Image (cartoon, rainbow, N blue to C red):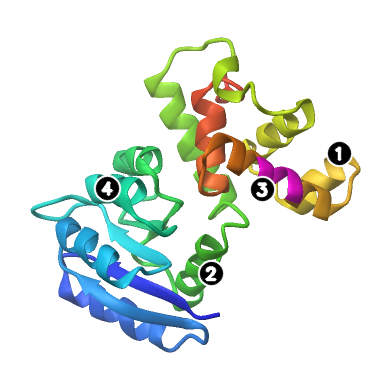
């Protein structure tokens, strides 16, 4: 199945460069280019892409607000992959909170770009688990005080599902979780699917954010 991609960046060279790189990849099609966040929101509604490559800093409507609108209003699931210049850009924290599924540095190689799009489109794993985990943890550390888990926001999960959610937030893959719990990988996939449905989340990245925000998992040092 072809992954349909929309590129949103106010720099024409970035848009064209990513279009060329992704256009050469099998199974990926660039269906549009947006010049700012507002344009991205409008084109998502019109084109229904699978993935949006979203720059953070853009005129008229920035990437964070655009991501929030897309996550809230899109009739079909759309994954947002944030583009940033620095891997610890403070705005990335807000983008994840707004609904982004991961982030990518603008100087990524063609292979890294294509792999990131495929990973985010599949929703099977966190993008760059170690880095994304660090971003989520840092955002949680600086924005919330230590607290007991919010049982109201995770109370619908079974004990095993809660355990799986905690391991997702620690950056473990399905195979790693299966090994940790001594169960089949397919069983883990089933648990993950149920967690996302019960909590109304789109993918594993949002599940990890939820685990930190509810206090189920605490940042390192707490």
Q: Where 42 sits versus 63, above or below? A: below
Residue 222 visible in the displayed image: no
What residue is at 20 percent from the left and 62 percent from the top?
Answer: 42
Between marks 2 and 4 in the image, the one whose residue lies nearer the viewer? 4
Residue highlighted by disc 3: 193
Disc 2 to disc 4, C-alpha distance:
23 Å
Contact? badges 2 and 3 (CB < 8 Å): no
Mark 1 vs mark 4, CA separation in Å: 37 Å
Rendered residue at 33%/38% (across/down): 94
Q: Give the quarter of the image for residue 8.
A: bottom left
Residues shaded magenta: 190-194
Please tell me which of labels 1 and 3 falls first in the chain: 1
Report which residue position mark 1 lands on: 181
Tell me the residue that label 4 is attached to. 69
Q: As displayed, is residue 49 above or below residue 59?
A: below
Lower position in the chain sequence, tag 2 or tag 3: 2
- Answer with mark 2 or mark 4, whichever residue precedes in sequence: 4
Residue 172 in percent (x, y) is at 69, 45
Disc 2 crowd, CA 10 A, few/some/many (<14, 14-19, 20+): some
Residue 38 in view in this figure: yes
- Looking at the rendered structure, the secondary structure element under dot 4 is helix
- Is 109 on the left-hand or right-hand side of 16? right
Q: Alpha carbon of mark 2 to alpha carbon of mark 3: how far?
A: 19 Å
């Amino acid at each position: 199945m072809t992954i349909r991609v929309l590129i949103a960046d106010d720099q024409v060279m970035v848009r064209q460069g990513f279009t060329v790189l992704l256009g050469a990849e099998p199974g990926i099609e660039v269906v549009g280019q947006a010049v700012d966040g507002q344009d991205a929101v409008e084109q998502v509604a019109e084109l229904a892409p699978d993935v949006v490559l979203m720059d953070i800093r853009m005129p008229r409507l920035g990437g964070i607000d655009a991501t929030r609108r897309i996550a809230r209003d899109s009739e079909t699931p759309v994954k947002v992959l944030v583009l940033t210049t620095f891997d610890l850009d403070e705005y990335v924290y807000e983008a994840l909170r707004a609904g982004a599924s991961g982030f990518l540095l603008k100087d990524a190689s063609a292979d890294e770009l294509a792999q990131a799009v495929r990973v985010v489109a599949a929703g099977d794993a966190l993008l760059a688990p170690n880095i994304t985990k660090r971003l989520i943890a840092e955002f949680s550390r600086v924005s919330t005080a230590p607290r007991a888990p919010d049982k109201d926001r995770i109370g619908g999960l079974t004990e095993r599902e809660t355990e799986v959610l905690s391991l997702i937030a620690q950056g473990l893959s399905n195979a790693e979780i299966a090994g940790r719990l001594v169960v089949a990988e397919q069983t883990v996939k089933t648990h993950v699917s149920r967690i996302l449905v019960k909590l109304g989340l789109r993918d594993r990245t949002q599940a990890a954010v939820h685990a930190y925000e509810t206090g189920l998992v605490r940042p390192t040092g707490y």
